[in-house]
Amino acid sequence: MQNVNIWSEEFGAETDTPILLIMGSMSQGILWPDEFVGRLTAGGRRVIRYDHRDTGMSGTVDFEAEPYTWDDIKNDVYRVMDNHGLESAHLVCHSAGGLLGQFVAVERPERVRSLTVIGSSPLGGGEGLVIMRALLGQPQPEGSLPEPAPEFVAFYRTLMAAPPPADRRARIDGMIAEQRLLHGTGLPFDEDAARRLQERIYDRARDLSAVANHRLAAMAKPDFEPVGVLHQVKAPTLVIEGSHEPVKPGHSAIIAEQIPGARLMIVAGMGHTLPPEAHEELAAAILAHTAG
């Protein structure tokens, strides 16, 4: 077991109902917006967010010397819970964090009081392969998950062919462009707020380039996701997708179909980020889902 330091922080009273926020691949915990976290805390929840290994203020790994897989990233969920003294918690997960949450709900059901997945894909669906085939222009086998939007494919094809950014300003400009794409087209995009967020992400990272290790971890064990197990999820499950989801369009309905009793919620205008316009609706739904 690698002893990688994981940065986390918590809000609310220790006696409040615990929610663990699990962010997506290559993403810092602060992408759970402060205002959204505040709404959950005001609703009587003890909220914990954390930086995955190789992101933000968590420890970075020399991948060549100490390779790891997404099993290790998943097991960090248990480490965070243990370090905060939680035998169980409500898991609220975004994007690839949703894969982790689904996996934990199958593997250790006693630790998951409820599950909420936002902008995610079904565990075992091979979403990473779908995106890679789309970027390479390869055909998708019959039964594959829906492809990302054309503008997503075009953006990352261009990015893959571009030289690395020359300096901090160029890097942050690129991060803002990526956030604009993920935001989708359903709501106005606040570029000033995006710049403040991306500057914060840049400045608090121990090593911004280390996030690429998450891709290496995926390649190290491509069959990380168990297949055909979502019927085993016992936790009450809420599945949320934005109406303008550019990365995983329609994936949430597939998750909801495969998990017994799961509820599907579509948020008007939302893309693959958590915009201010959606905070009230998202927080209200999660507070209701985690009550009792």
Image: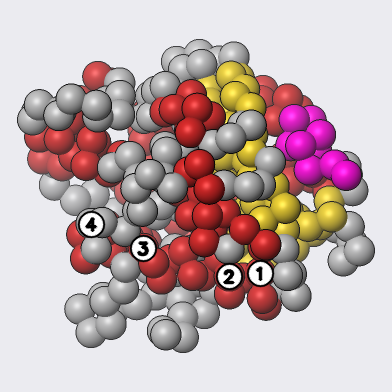
Magenta segment boundaries in residue numbering: 283-292
Neighbour tally class for label 4: few under 14, some 14-19, many 20 plus, Cα within 10 Å: some
Q: CA distance from mark 4 to mark 3?
A: 9 Å
**Please, what secondary structure does the residue beneath circle 3 have?**
helix
Q: CA distance from mark 4 to mark 1?
A: 26 Å
Give the x, y percent position of residue 16: 89, 57
In the shown orientation, is residue 236 left or right of residue 95? right
- Kindly identify which residue carries mark 3: 70
Please name the predominant secondary structure of the magenta segment in the image: helix
The disc labelled 3 sits on which kind of residue?
Answer: Trp
In the shown orientation, is residue 212 left or right of residue 192? left
> Mark 4 or mark 1, which has the lower sequence index?
1
Q: Is the C-beta separation of discs 4 and 3 under 8 Å?
A: no
- Kindly identify which residue carries mark 1: 81
Q: CA distance from mark 3 to mark 1?
A: 17 Å
> Mark 2 or mark 3, which has the lower sequence index?
3
Residue 53 in view in this figure: yes
Give the x, y percent position of residue 38: 79, 45
- Kindly identify which residue carries mark 2: 78
> Mark 4 or mark 3, which has the lower sequence index?
3
Q: Is the C-beta separation of discs 1 and 2 under 8 Å?
A: yes
- Kindly identify which residue carries mark 4: 222
Q: Is the C-beta separation of discs 2 and 3 under 8 Å?
A: no
